[in-house]
Image: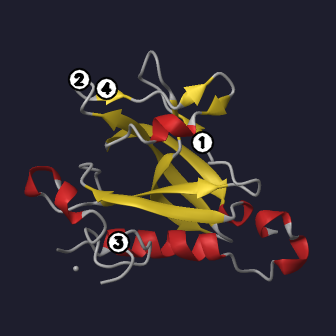
Amino acid sequence: MGCGKKDDFKGKSCVCEVVRAIKDIQDNAEDVCECPSNCFLEPLGAISPSNRKRHKRPDTRVFTLKTADGSPFHAFFTGNDCACVSIFFRVEEVFDNCCAVLRVLEPVNRKEGPDKTVNLADDCCIDLRKVCEVDYFRSTNDCVTVDLTCFCAVQCIADVDLDVCED
């Protein structure tokens, strides 16, 4: 039922396959020419390699998802008094029929002061103009479980090191 087209869904979802590929790339992170933000680009670190923090290897491919109407999917995170909505995610697990656990990433702007959180929300909606202010991401302790067949697009943003613990 991807993108609201029940007849087109035959048990596969391109968004699901891309998120599975991101998970595989994250799991096989190493120290890369295609579209510089192609979600299938390997190894992890190939997207935005100049943005590496303290010369550590990236452990996360940051991405966004779009719903059937073209709007960015968003989720809430805690621990910030003025901004608590993000459209940026890290895949933690993919399971069953294209379900996934996504870690919500906090959008940060380093130019506005010491790691200022970017408030993406404007009353009821995501303010797309504020997305351009984001230049880094912080890991949160908030996750959301989603059905990946409900999304129409996935866009990879950057490969970053978030010091996320792996089992």
Label 3 to label 4: alpha-carbon separation? 27 Å
Residue at the extreme left of the image, as rendered: 55
Q: Amino acid at mark 2?
A: Gly
Q: Callout 4: 10 Å neighbours few (<14), some, many (20+)? A: some
Q: Callout 2: 10 Å neighbours few (<14), some, many (20+)? A: few
Residue drawn at the location 62% of the way across and 48% of the way down: 72
**Among the two numbered marks 1 and 3 on one chain, the one whose residue lies closer to the N terminus:** 3
Q: Which mark is residue 96?
A: none
Residue drawn at the location 44% of the way across and 72% of the way down: 39
**Among the two numbered marks 1 and 2 on one chain, the one whose residue lies closer to the N terminus:** 1
In the rendering, at what x and y percent does residue 59 appear? Answer: 27, 60
In the rendering, at what x and y percent does residue 162 appear? Answer: 27, 49
Label 1 to label 4: alpha-carbon separation? 19 Å
Cβ atoms under marks 3 and 2 closer than 8 Å: no
In the rendering, at what x and y percent does residue 79 appear? Answer: 41, 23
**Among the two numbered marks 1 and 4 on one chain, the one whose residue lies closer to the N terminus:** 1
Report which quarter residue 36 is drawn in. bottom left
* Numbered disc in front, either 1 or 4: 4
Cβ atoms under marks 2 and 4 closer than 8 Å: yes
What residue does disc 1 label? 74
Residue drawn at the location 31% of the way across and 67% of the way down: 47
Q: Which mark is residue 36?
A: 3
What residue does disc 4 label? 116
SS class of the residue under badge 4? Answer: strand
**Among the two numbered marks 3 and 2 on one chain, the one whose residue lies closer to the N terminus:** 3
Work out whether 139 lies above or below 93: above
